[in-house]
Image (tube, helix red, strand yellow):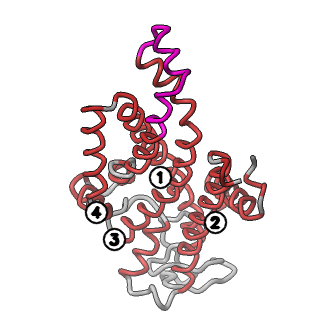
Amino acid sequence: MSPFASWSGGFGAIFLSLVVLIAVLAPWLSPYDPLVNNFDAAGQLRRLAPPSAAHLLGTTYYGLDVLSQLIHGTRIVLIVGITCAVLIALIGTNIGLIAGYYGGRVDTVLMRATDLAFGVPFIPFAVVLVALLGPSLWNTIIAISFLMWRSTARVIRSQVLSLRERGFVKAARIAGASDMRILYVHIFPNVLPMALLYVSFDIAWAVLAEASISFLGFGDPHQTSWGQMLYLAYVSGSIRQAWWWTVPPGAALSLFVIAVFLVGREYERLANPRLR
C-alpha cells in the first residue's frame, strides 16, 4: 500500500518529500546566512523589516532573514525527528521483545520500568535534563529519546506475548534455536511493521518535543530551529507585531506534524488489515 492511496496520504508524502528536498538544498536555497545580521545601505540594522523583495519573509528583531532561518530549520527537524525515532524504536522494540518473550520476573521488571517512564512528566523532565547536560542539539535528542520509548515497548510486548505461543516459535525452539535467534530471526520480522508504524509517529512527537524545549529557551543557541525562532520572537516582545516572524515557523511545524500523521495513518492500514 502506498501513501498515495488517499489524497491525505498523498499530501503528507508530497509535503515530507518537499521538506527533505529543502533540507538537502538549504545552503543553495537560503538567500542569506541564517545567523548573520543584515544591514541596509545606511549601515542600520534591518530590525523587524516586513516582507520585501530583499527579504521575502522579512527580518527578525536581530536583523536575521526569516526565510533563511526557516529553510535551515528543516535540517534540525529531520535530524531530530529521524534520530529520535530510530533511538526510540531501538529501545522500545528491544524492551518489548525481551519482556514479552521471557515473561516472568524479566517482564515484571521491564514493565514496571515502563510504568515509571509513563509516570514521569515528559516536558519538565526533558527541560531539567537539558539544563543539567547543557543546551545542545544532541542533549535535546537524548532527553527526548530517554522517555518516549514507553509506548513502543508496551505495544511490541503485547504482540510478542501472542507470537511466542505460535507454532513456528515452538518449532524453532524444538529445533534447538537459541533465544536470540528466535527473538530476532523468527519473532522480530513479525513485529517489524508495528515498530515501523511507531517510528513514523515518533518522528512527529520528537519534532514537537524539540520545538517545545526550544520555545522554553533550552534549545541549542548555535542552531536554527523552528521552535527557537518562536522563542526569540517571544523574548524580544515581537511575537504579536511581527507576524512574518512567527507565522512561517508555526505553520511549517504544524504542517510537518500533520503530514507525518497522515502518512503514518496510511501505513497503519497496512500494519493493521482490520482498518482497510
Q: Nearer the viewer, residue 136 or 9?
A: 9
Does 168 sit above or below residue 32?
A: above
Residue at 56 percent of width and 64 percent of height: 257
Name the front one of labels 3 and 4.
4
Q: Earlier in the sequence, mark 3 or mark 2?
A: 2
Q: What element carries label 2?
A: loop
* Residue receiving disc 1: 80
Horizontal and vertical percent position of residue 271? 63, 45
Name which residue type carries label 1: Val
* Residue receiving disc 3: 216
Name which residue type carries label 2: Pro
Calculate the distance from the C-alpha at mark 3 to the C-alpha at mark 4. Answer: 15 Å
Name which residue type carries label 4: Pro
Name which residue type carries label 3: Leu
Does 163 sit above or below residue 219?
A: above
* Residue receiving disc 2: 31
Residue at 35 percent of width and 34 percent of height: 99
Q: How many neighbours does mark 2 have within 10 angstroms: few (below 14), some (14-19), or many (20 or more)?
A: some
Q: Nearer the viewer, residue 58 or 256?
A: 256
Calculate the distance from the C-alpha at mark 1 to the C-alpha at mark 3. Answer: 17 Å
Q: Which residue lies furthest to the left in this view?
A: 132
Calculate the distance from the C-alpha at mark 3 to the C-alpha at mark 2. Answer: 28 Å
Q: Nearer the viewer, residue 139 or 158?
A: 158
Horizontal and vertical percent position of residue 36? 49, 66
Q: Which of marks 1 and 2 is nearer the N terminus?
A: 2
Name the front one of labels 4 and 1.
4
The reply to whether callout 4 and callout 2 are in contact (CB within 8 Å) is: no
* Residue receiving disc 4: 121
